[in-house]
Image (cartoon, grey):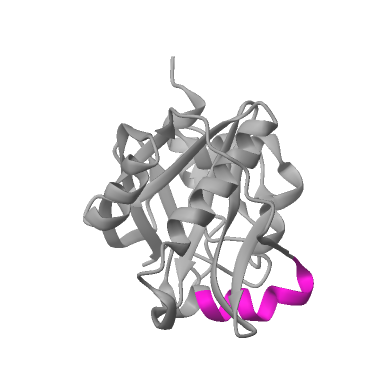
């Protein structure tokens, strides 16, 4: 049986349909929330439904799953890569000194994510979960938060630091704090990283995350 973690995008969209477009065969996040999408499975019907959710032009979706990505007819993979899915295995301590971010910080959050590219981050990605940040001299120096979620599991995501403030351990502090809050609620924290991002993987391993599996990731557009 496929575990929800093997198709985390589908599991998250099923659990929170208010964030979704689509139906029982394929879904994508609303276009100002995130760019991830998923078919229910690799049947012809599900893949056709996924293709129907992608418009032409600059519209694109990201697929992230353990099974190999099957590109639906009518779409093409413009990018493909491998990622790792990591699970927290150690309890982490809360950090009450960090700032909770919200709508008033949305423009700064989007600007920081656009600069540092921690993953797809759109104007309303910050509404997917609790985000926290660190300000230095009034500037948003670093942030991290929650993204995909389904029963018992919440993803740590959006971890990024402005280049002007790297080397201060901010990403480590934020990642641990986000994980601690997830654990406080009795849920399992997980996250994703590109296989090529060895620095990030090493950081997460030092916090007690372990690699569960490899993910296939593809960016799909209309032909």
**Which segment did they paint magenta?**
102-112
Is residue 151 found left or right of 213 in the rendered image? right
Residue 202 included in the magenta stretch of the image: no
Eyeballing the image, is 63 above or below 25?
A: below
Determine the residue located farthest toward the top in the rendered image: 1
Residue 110 included in the magenta stretch of the image: yes
* 65 or 140: nearer the viewer: 140
Eyeballing the image, is 5 above or below 38?
A: above
Q: Residue at x 66, y 26 (%)?
A: 186
Where residue 117 sits: x, y (%)? Answer: 42, 71
Where residue 205 sits: x, y (%)? Answer: 32, 40
Is residue 198 found left or right of 207 in the rendered image? left
Q: Residue at x 59, y 50 (%)?
A: 147
On the question of residue 209 being in view, the answer is yes
Where residue 135 sits: x, y (%)? Answer: 61, 75
On the question of residue 24 being in view, the answer is no
Eyeballing the image, is 138 above or below 171?
A: below
């Amino acid at each position: 049986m496929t575990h929800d973690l093997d198709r985390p995008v589908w599991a998250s969209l099923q659990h929170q349909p208010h964030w979704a477009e689509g139906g029982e065969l394929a879904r994508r996040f609303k276009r100002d929330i995130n760019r991830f999408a998923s078919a229910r499975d690799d049947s012809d019907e599900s893949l056709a439904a996924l293709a129907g959710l992608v418009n032409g032009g600059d519209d694109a979706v990201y697929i992230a799953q353990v099974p190999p990505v099957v590109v639906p007819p009518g779409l093409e993979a413009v990018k493909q890569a491998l990622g790792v899915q990591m699970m927290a295995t150690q309890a982490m301590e809360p950090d009450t000194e960090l700032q909770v971010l919200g709508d008033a910080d949305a423009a700064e959050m989007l600007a920081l994510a656009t600069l540092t590219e921690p993953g797809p981050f759109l104007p309303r990605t910050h509404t997917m979960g609790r985000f926290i940040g660190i300000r230095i001299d009034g500037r948003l120096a670093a942030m991290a938060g929650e993204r995909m979620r389904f029963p018992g599991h919440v993803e740590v995501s959006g971890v990024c630091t402005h280049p002007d403030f790297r080397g201060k351990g901010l990403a480590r502090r934020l990642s641990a704090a986000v994980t601690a809050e997830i654990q406080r609620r009795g849920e399992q924290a997980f996250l994703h990283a590109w296989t090529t991002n060895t620095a990030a993987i090493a950081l997460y391993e030092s916090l007690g995350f372990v690699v569960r599996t490899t993910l296939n990731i593809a960016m799909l557009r209309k032909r």
